[in-house]
Amino acid sequence: TQPVRMIPTGNLRRRPGRSVSLLLLMFGLSGNAIAGKWTVTPDIDVRETYTDNASLVAVTTEGDFVTQVAPGIHIAGRGARFKGNLDYTANAIFYGRNSTQDRIANYLNANGTLEAIEKIFYVDAYGNVRQTFVSPFAPQPRDVTSSTNNRAETRTYGISPYVRGQVGNAFSYQLRYRYAATTSNSSALPDLYTTDWTGRVASPIRLFGWGLDYDYNTINYKDYSSFVAPRLYSKLYRGTLYFQPDPRLRLSASGGQEEDTYSHV
């Protein structure tokens, strides 16, 4: 039986705080909106494993006992104008012979939608944390207890406020902003930040119809010594005319302008 060791506070760097904070922020925006049915389900899994090669090194086959303690929580609910889900598991991994490899592997999948102003203004938010690999040519063990320098923890979180509605029978509209960030605990992977503005105004399509679209997207990489990329963007303006002489037949013609900097990389 392995003695349980506490991981020093300095090793607890891989916490999905920003992802969870987005959901908690939305929870706090409107108490009346989120009042409803909520379920909170905690769980814990404990596993002891023996391996004859914990570090996946070909030149040595030193055996080791690995203790895995994985507490988790699932939250799901739906209120008057809010719905959300959160699944989080923290895999605390302890090695019998090599305690310097002790670590916490986080897993998170969270999302929520808030109707901030009824039938007009909405906010979506999400967060994900997962274990991935830096190189496709280095070891990629399926079991998270196997130690490898090729493993990295990536965190993706985003928020997207938008307005949408209908102006009588004349036209519908939607304007949406998206912000997303992907970071990791590996210096070999660049941090990635994207923003996206999209807008659409369109009439109902009877015999004729029309639509106007706008899309402006930016991609920013945080510079690393091994990866330097410029700020990338794409922009689109487009108008479309529709002709529908029959419910089974619709014709359209569109025109506009598009530009980007992707080809300059």
Image (tube, rainbow, N blue to C red):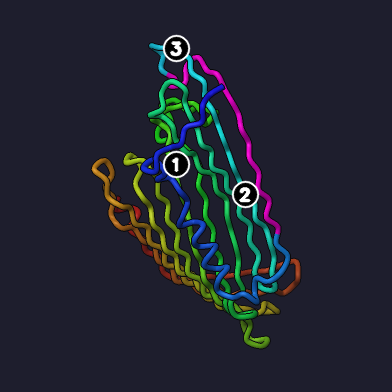
Disc 1 or disc 2, which is closer to the eye?
2
Q: Which mark is residue 153?
A: 1
Amino acid type at mark 3: Thr
10 Å neighbourhood of mark 3: few (<14), some, or many (≥20)?
Answer: few
* Image spot of residue 99 (x, y percent): 41, 27
The residue where tag 2 is placed is 73
Q: Going 58% across and 25% down the picture, which residue do you hit? A: 48
Q: Looking at numbered disc 1 in the image, what kind of residue is underneath it?
A: Glu
Task: Give the residue at x 52% y 55%.
Answer: 127
Q: Report helix, strand or loop for mark 2.
A: strand
Q: N-terminal of the two: label 1 or label 3?
A: 3
SS for dot 1 = strand
- Looking at the image, residue 44 lies above or below residue 61: below
Q: Nearer the viewer, residue 150 or 207?
A: 150
- Residue that appears at 42% across and 67% down: 216
Of 223 and 149, which appears nearest the observer?
Answer: 149
Q: Residues within 10 Å of mark 1 (few under 14, many from 20)?
A: some
Q: Is residue 54 magenta?
A: yes
Question: Which comes before the other along the chain, label 2 or label 3?
Answer: 3
Is residue 80 shown to the viewer in this render? yes
Q: Calculate the distance from the C-alpha at mark 1 to the C-alpha at mark 2.
A: 19 Å
Of 206 and 17, which appears nearest the observer?
17
Residue drawn at the location 62% of the way across and 74% of the way down: 31
Tell me: 227 left or right of 93: left
Using the image, determine if residue 127 lies above or below residue 6: below
Q: Which residue is mark 3?
A: 61
On whether residue 113 falls in the magenta region, the answer is no
Q: Which residues are magenta?
A: 39-56
